[in-house]
Amino acid sequence: MSLTILLFLSIVLLLGFAFTRTYVKRSMLARLNWDDLLIELEPVSTEEISTIALDYLHPRRGEARIQPEALWEMIGKADGLRKMYANAGVLIALAAYAQRWNRTESLVVVERMRRDGKILRRATLRLSLGLVLGYDRVYGPFSVQEAATAYYLMRERVLALYETSHAGRLPRLAAVV
């Protein structure tokens, strides 16, 4: 009985810590100016991520065009996954920053990006657990595809938003994102 209560309390504390950490990070990003947000972005292999995402979004005959082992390499392994996860919050903050010039469209884009971010977080969690528990060989490739596709969509959405909202900032944003 006491072990069950201890386990339950541990889970509650862990979830509380995760929510608090997310809230603090989100509020910190909201206070940054545009230049500081760009500095927060970590470099990822956008070409490789785009290849994975487009393969996932536009299926063709012979579904397995990219081999599962290659997917992990293409995203940059665990480090690339961590960078995509970290960049997701910054991309959302950049979209929210665009509300200064285009409130209506940016509200829609931010909400879509938040939903993409949830997919990215879930896929990252599944991959992390899969690596630890050893079931990543079966389900890992699907999670890599989901994470890459969510990140790709977030990137494309923020670039499209800046193209219509503040085209002057688009070249610099496109260079770092």
Image (cartoon, rainbow, N blue to C red):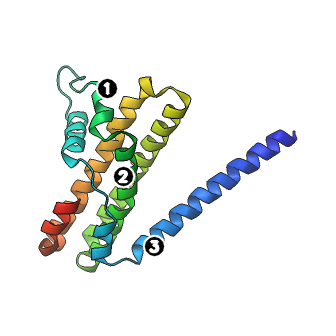
Closer to the eye: label 2 or 1: 2
Query: How many residues crowd around disc 2 within 10 Å: few (fewer than 14), some, or many (20 or more)?
Result: some
Query: What residue lies at 75% left-to-right and 46% top-to-bottom?
Result: 8
Mark 3 or 2, which is nearer the eye? 2
140 over 147 or under it: above or below:
above
- Above or below: residue 21 compared with residue 75: below
Residue 28 disc label? 3
- Residue 141: mark in rendering: none
SS state under label 1: helix
Q: Position of residue 105 (x, y in %)?
A: 25, 68
Tell me if label 1 and label 3 are in contact, CB under 8 Å: no
Which mark is on residue 83? 2
The reply to whether discs 2 and 1 touch (Cβ–Cβ < 8 Å) is: no
In-image side of 99 versus 119 (left or right)? left
Pick the quarter of the image with the C terminus. Answer: bottom left
- Front in this rendered view, residue 70 or 56: 70
Indicate the amino acid at tag 2. Lys
Q: Residue at x 20, y 66 (%)?
A: 173
Nearest to the observer: residue 34 or residue 106 = 34
Name the element at disc 2: helix
Residue 68 disc label: 1
Q: Earlier in the sequence, mark 2 or mark 1?
A: 1
> Closest to the observer: 112 or 85?
85
The image quarter containing residue 38 is bottom left
Residue type at tag 1: Pro
Q: Position of residue 128 (x, y in %)?
A: 49, 39
Q: Position of residue 3 (x, y in %)?
A: 83, 40
State the residue at coordinates (62%, 53%).
Answer: 15
